[in-house]
DNA sequence: TCTTGGCACTCACTCCCGGAGAGTGCCAGT
DNA sequence: ACTGGCACTCTCCGGGAGTGAGTGCCAAGA
């Protein structure tokens, strides 16, 4: 359908349009790229490309700009992924070095990603599925209230408020012992199974208290920590002030809604490689003029979560894809090594 | 200096300009407000107000707009604080009802504030200074790493990674007992004092381990949780798309910097009542065209933290001030009651 | 059959001009 | 001290002409 030259022309249109922000015409094209044909030939090819839906013109007497379909082809077949610059590699190293805990890793990752892609970055908290229950504690607070605290081997600490009633310190101590003995060392999924049978083994007097605590623990082990999402680099949106209505506004609105962010990233889940959603391909209507470049991250076939960026469809895909991939890989390795 | 009528005119200019977004002229002024004088008189007064620096004209043949100084006078002396509408009161109630823990309260507060003021909301985490140390735990993870976990009576849980070396479970148990015995029930500030002397009482063999754990605890007790700030309602900025460079861009940039946010709120600290910083009064250069309305919140002379909103200087101060004040008070009461 | 030069045509963009309208400052009169 | 009147200033359209980039098409050439 599309011969080599047409494809080369599409590539040239995409790269020129991305860098110049202006519709690109046939003359400019032959001048800036060594196509070895005349503008007239290019025009004929462009007419075909337009007919096929890869490019379009804003108005009759203007140059062409890529359509979503055009970007799609470019990303799938034409965009040789640019290798990162040494400076960027170094940035990744120094940015992540010295991260304290998971929170800190996530915070640094989002900053890093925003900085090297110059886009808005989104990072989902990792689900460390290989982590096991390390420690369970029950702490009474004022009155009948207390906290159940769960520590996993990965260093994650989760807490939930719980109604303790007027349990004695002895009751709590026993509960603590029982729970820890039963659950420490188990993966969360196994812990859930174990918890459901654990209740029956409780002495009758501790049933009511046990029930509420077990319920909290159940919540904590099943609750997906990856529903937490961190966002950064929002000021990068100011570079697109001209596309306020189509880009800035919808992105700001999407960022406010965790659910939307999770859907945007969620669709990229599964594959470990970079996923690109262009314009209308996004599972969120208002983001018609933006693309999402995302990648799951993890270690050794173990997928933990997803990270990515949002930006206008007119973005530098090769660099962005390379950056997202590099950061995802690095973070995976970093978290695996601790 | 300014007689009653001039002051009334200034008030009229501010209110009209805020609602219409357009420079207001003498004719419109007498028509919309019952000033009982002719436009010519108003013009004379406006000339004086301009000379004094309260208002200015964008260009010769336009109406007047208030200056920062004009807004300042308006806020200080002229803006009768509007009472909240019943709908707003109800919104506050329903929004906060059912909040689970401190995190949840903060999240809900920021949403609420953004919603009723239609501005970008900023909420600082509360310093619950009256809280005491409730529980300390030390949990070993992989290898030499471990976690120190601190629970306060207010239900806040803090954790810090710590190098345990190859301490035995017995050593840790002893440490746990010692620390809890020494610190439970103390206010953080006292705990810090106590910690510094505690080290000397350690058996020699536990000194190195003790030192690193005490250091972590020190960090945790001194580290101000109120350095955490939560932001919401960013999409409200889209209403000011026309002032992209002066409002949207600088605000987005400020929001990315915790330090800046803390400074913006920080200056409002101390007084429990609402503080308004208009334009150049802000301690952050780029926010020349925006105002910050903030209030500390707390309970019974106990100030915990600050919350507020950022928006263009051209905002509805009476309503905004009323909303910020109401939310601050409600949150203070809510947190006190638990 | 593909490519090319030429040519007429379209259409956004800019500049300019003139009229309308809003608003001001000033002055003389009450 | 206030008011009506008046001349003046500027912004804000709307229309019209010129410019230039870019296109589509066609006929000639390889």
Image (spheres, coloured by chain):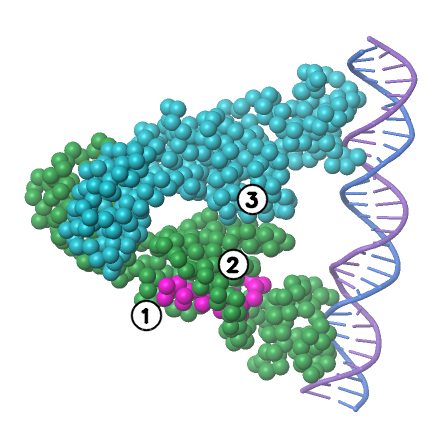
Chain colours: A cyan, B green, C blue, D purple
Residue A139 vs B145, above or below: the answer is below
Q: Which residue is mark 3?
A: A251
Q: Locate residue A276: give its quadrant.
A: top right
Q: Which chain does the numbered disc 2 sit on?
A: B
Return the residue nearer the eye: A51 or B228: A51
The answer to whether dots 3 and 2 both sit on one chain is no
Q: Quadrant of residue A67?
A: top right
Magenta range is B313-334
Q: If the image is split into quadrants, where does the C terminus of chain B sit?
A: bottom left
Q: Quadrant of residue C4?
A: top right
Q: Nearer the viewer, mark 2 or mark 1?
A: 2
| Residue B20 marker | none
Q: Residues within 10 Å of mark 1 (few under 14, many from 20)?
A: few
Residue B315 magenta-drawn?
Answer: yes
Q: Is residue B213 visible?
A: no
Residue occupying image coordinates x 53% and y 23%: A81
- Camera-side residue: A272 or A160? A160
* Circle 2 residue: B115
Q: Above or below — where is B188 with respect to A123?
A: below
Q: Which residue is mark 1?
A: B300
Q: Is residue B172 visible?
A: yes
Q: Is residue B117 left or right of residue A203?
A: right
């Amino acid at each position: 359908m599309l011969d080599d030259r047409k494809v080369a022309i599409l590539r040239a249109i995409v790269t020129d349009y991305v860098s110049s922000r202006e519709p690109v015409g046939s003359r400019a094209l032959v001048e800036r790229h060594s196509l070895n044909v005349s503008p007239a030939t290019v025009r004929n090819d462009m007419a075909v490309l337009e007919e096929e839906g890869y490019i379009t013109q804003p108005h009759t007497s203007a140059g062409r700009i890529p359509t979503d379909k055009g970007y799609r082809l470019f990303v799938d077949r034409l965009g040789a992924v640019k290798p990162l610059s040494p400076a960027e590699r170094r940035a990744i190293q120094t940015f992540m070095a010295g991260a304290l805990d998971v929170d800190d890793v996530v915070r640094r990752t989002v900053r890093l990603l925003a900085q090297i892609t110059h886009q808005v970055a989104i990072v989902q908290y990792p689900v460390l599925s290989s982590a096991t229950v390390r420690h369970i504690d029950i702490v009474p607070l004022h009155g009948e209230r207390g906290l159940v605290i769960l520590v996993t081997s990965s260093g994650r600490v989760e807490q939930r408020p719980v109604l303790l009633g007027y349990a004695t310190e002895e009751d709590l101590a026993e509960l603590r012992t029982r729970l820890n003995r039963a659950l420490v060392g188990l993966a969360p999924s196994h812990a859930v199974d174990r918890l459901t049978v654990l209740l029956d083994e409780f002495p009758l007097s501790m049933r009511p208290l046990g029930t509420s605590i077990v319920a909290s623990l159940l919540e904590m082990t099943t609750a997906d920590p990856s529903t937490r999402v961190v966002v950064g680099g929002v000021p990068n949106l100011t570079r697109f002030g001209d596309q306020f209505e189509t880009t800035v506004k919808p992105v700001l609105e999407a960022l406010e809604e965790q659910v939307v962010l999770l859907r945007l990233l969620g669709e990229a889940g599964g594959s470990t490689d970079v996923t690109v959603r262009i314009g209308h391909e996004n599972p969120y209507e208002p983001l018609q003029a933006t693309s999402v470049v995302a990648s799951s991250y993890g270690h050794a076939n173990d997928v933990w979560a997803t990270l990515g960026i949002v930006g206008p469809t007119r973005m530098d895909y090769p660099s962005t894809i390379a950056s997202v991939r590099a950061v995802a890989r690095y973070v995976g390795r970093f978290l695996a090594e601790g």
